[in-house]
Image (spheres, rainbow, N blue to C red):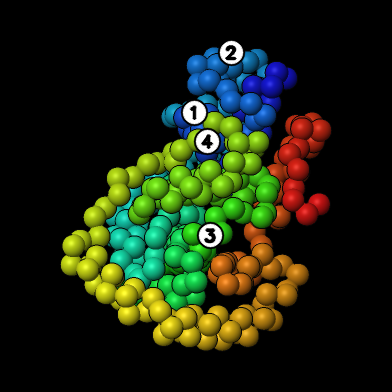
Amino acid sequence: MTPTESAILRTVLYGDVFDFALTVPEIHHFLIADQPVPYPELVHTLEHSTYLRSILTVEAGYVVCGHRRDLIPLRQERDRVAAQLWEQAQRYGVWLARLPFVRMVALTGALALRNPAGLGDDLDYLLVTTPNRVWLARACSILLVRWVKLRGIVICPNYVLAATALEQTRRDLFMAREITQMIPLYDTGIYSALRAANGWVSAYLPNAKAPFYPQPEPAAGRGWNALKRLAEALLGGAVGDRIEQWEFKRKSRRFARELHQPTSAAQIDAEHVKGHFNDHGHPILRKYQERLRQYELDEETLPIAGD
């Protein structure tokens, strides 16, 4: 195979791990390659490669492995579900942005890629906070989580980090995809700083320079901005410091057992609250490697951090 053929196949196979049929623009954006590939070159290769045409199916605008045609109607259904969930995701993203010390809100998880399992799916978010207020901001977000749950909706701000801790220490294809598929909803300036701090992502996904689904930043409202500034003024000094330390110590003790489980990918410290106690990254990458070997692409497998 040519490098472009190989890159297309690797990208389709990664989507296959998630039972996810990709569009051609999605393949181009999330292309797993060593170097950027222009869109016309990718389209030409996909249309004229004898090998790819023998193993892939292109139908209704989606691309799947030849034996996975069932993923196309599944993707169409999930697109419909995503459209229904999207307004909710934006609305609660605004509510999260109104919380004290929150400086950026990004939608993550399955919905960010238009791949929710159903209308009851969690709405996952990443929050960036001012330094030394990670735990206080998280505590405020949990109050919002509990209020929203009363309405039958589950929001999960499951990754909270300080604006001084944007660089990710885990560097593998899974994390690269998580970073590139997140959708900033509030303060795209910090999103740009996060992407700049993780320039290593380009070694995996050189075409994914910006969000695939960019969204206009909604206004939080003047009244809410004033309340936010007031809360930050009241909690910005010694009182806030004490609450921050108390919450950090309390939750560190609470999470100690889960944190040291073999399956944990959590990160609990003064600058991070990453509550991923069941690591999905390495199992997903191993499934991906299995698919690569089926197509004799194991020699081109990208490295997995920790292996």
Which percent across, then down, holds residue 171?
Answer: 68, 49
Closer mark to the observer between disc 1 and disc 4:
4
> Considering the numbered disc 4 on the image, is that residue within a helix, a strand or a loop?
loop
Given contact means CB atoms under 8 Å apart, are the residues at marks 2 and 4 in contact? no
**73 in relation to 119, above or below:** above
- Circle 3 packing at 10 Å, graded few (<14), some (14-19), many (20+), is few
Asked whether residue 188 appears in the rendered view, the answer is: yes
- Identify residue for label 4: 208
Quarter location, residue 65: top right
N-terminal of the pair, mark 3 or mark 1, is 1
Measured in 3D between alpha carbons, the distance from the residue under mark 2 to the one under mark 4, in whole angstroms, is 24 Å
What residue is rendered at 37% in x and 41% in y?
A: 214
Closer mark to the observer between disc 4 and disc 3:
3
Q: Name the amino acid, label 2.
A: His
- Identify residue for label 1: 24
Measured in 3D between alpha carbons, the distance from the residue under mark 4 to the one under mark 3, in whole angstroms, is 24 Å
Which percent across, then down, holds residue 76?
Answer: 42, 42
- Circle 2 packing at 10 Å, graded few (<14), some (14-19), many (20+), is few
N-terminal of the pair, mark 4 or mark 3, is 3
Quarter location, residue 14: top right
Which percent across, then down, holds residue 124?
Answer: 46, 61
Q: Name the amino acid, label 4.
A: Ala
Q: Name the amino acid, label 1.
A: Val
Closer mark to the observer between disc 2 and disc 4:
4
N-terminal of the pair, mark 1 or mark 4, is 1
Asked whether residue 16 appears in the rendered view, the answer is: no
Quarter of the image for the N terminus: give it: top right
Q: On the picture, is 185 further left or further right than 37?
A: left
